[in-house]
Image (cartoon, rainbow, N blue to C red):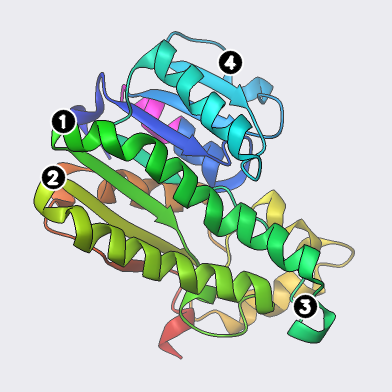
Amino acid sequence: MQFSEYAGQTVLITGAASGIGLAQVNAFRAQGANVIAIDRQAQPDSLGAGADLSYQVADVTDEAALVAAIHAGIDQLGQPQIVCNTAGRLDGYRPTLETSLADWQRILATDLTSQFIVTNTVLPAMLTQQHGVFVNMASIAGLVAGGGGAAYTAAKHAIIGYTKQLDLDYAGQGIRANCIAPGAIDTPMNAADFAGDGKMAKWVASETPAKRWAKPEEVADLALFLASCHADYIHGTVVPIDGGWLEK
């Protein structure tokens, strides 16, 4: 998949150290884009160095640190034309009575509020340029119950609503916002499902019509398309990539 339009563009990606975020960093760099990568973990050795990468260590739940990281990246690579709000964390499938207020707030801060902070930090410059694209990471847990616990499901549903409103409010000013809703993706975030004899991972695969887990690179490829000019008329939409989970 080749998208020559990304050459020289700047893309901001959160959750960039592993899983889908890391795959997105690699995918956009391979297309010639400059990438501002943000994660609370140190830069993975696999990313290497390069003038096309600004790797910033920051916890997305820390507003001051997150905003500072964004500005540091902008100082290096310029204003982003594309944002992939990918950072997220699971909640152990805990129902509401097993979810403390602190845990609830931690999940929402990571999965939802970080997207609000990133968006409000970069959106003014995008509006000045009359161009900007957001690819926000939701989940099948944003469309149905059972993909997470109370906090994760609430956060992912809220991301979809936020994305739709973001697009509605600014589509006439050159902004596009869409969501990706992954199902079973083989990433470090889901490592617990593969622990031991991998019974849970095998069950998930058996319950997925495609009978397998996806690789993070498959989600990154979808992000490449959604952020591209080929998807310019796709607005405020949720695109599942779930091996058919939602069709059941």
Q: Nearer the viewer, mark 1 or mark 3?
A: 1
**Relative image position of residue 128 (x, y in whole percent):** 17, 32
**Dot 2 amino acid type:** Gly
Which residue shows up at 70% across the image and 62% down it? 105
What residue would you read off at disc 3? 94
Disc count in the image? Answer: 4
What residue would you read off at disc 4? 48
**Dot 4 amino acid type:** Gly
Segment tinted magenta in the rendering: 26-32
Q: Nearer the viewer, residue 184 or 228?
A: 228
What residue would you read off at disc 1? 129
Q: Earlier in the sequence, mark 2 or mark 4?
A: 4
Which residue shows up at 11% across the image and 57% down it? 233
The quadrant of the rendering that contains the N terminus is top left
**Dot 1 amino acid type:** Gln
**Alpha carbons under labels 1 and 4: distance apart:** 31 Å
Q: Nearer the viewer, residue 105 or 176?
A: 105
The picture quadrant where one finds residue 49 is: top right
Q: Earlier in the sequence, mark 1 or mark 2?
A: 1
Left or right: residue 223 compared with residue 57: left
**Alpha carbons under labels 3 and 2: distance apart:** 40 Å
Q: Nearer the viewer, mark 1 or mark 4?
A: 1
SS of the residue under disc 1: helix
Q: Nearer the viewer, mark 2 or mark 4?
A: 2
What residue would you read off at disc 2? 174
For this orientation, the residue located farthest to the bottom is: 248
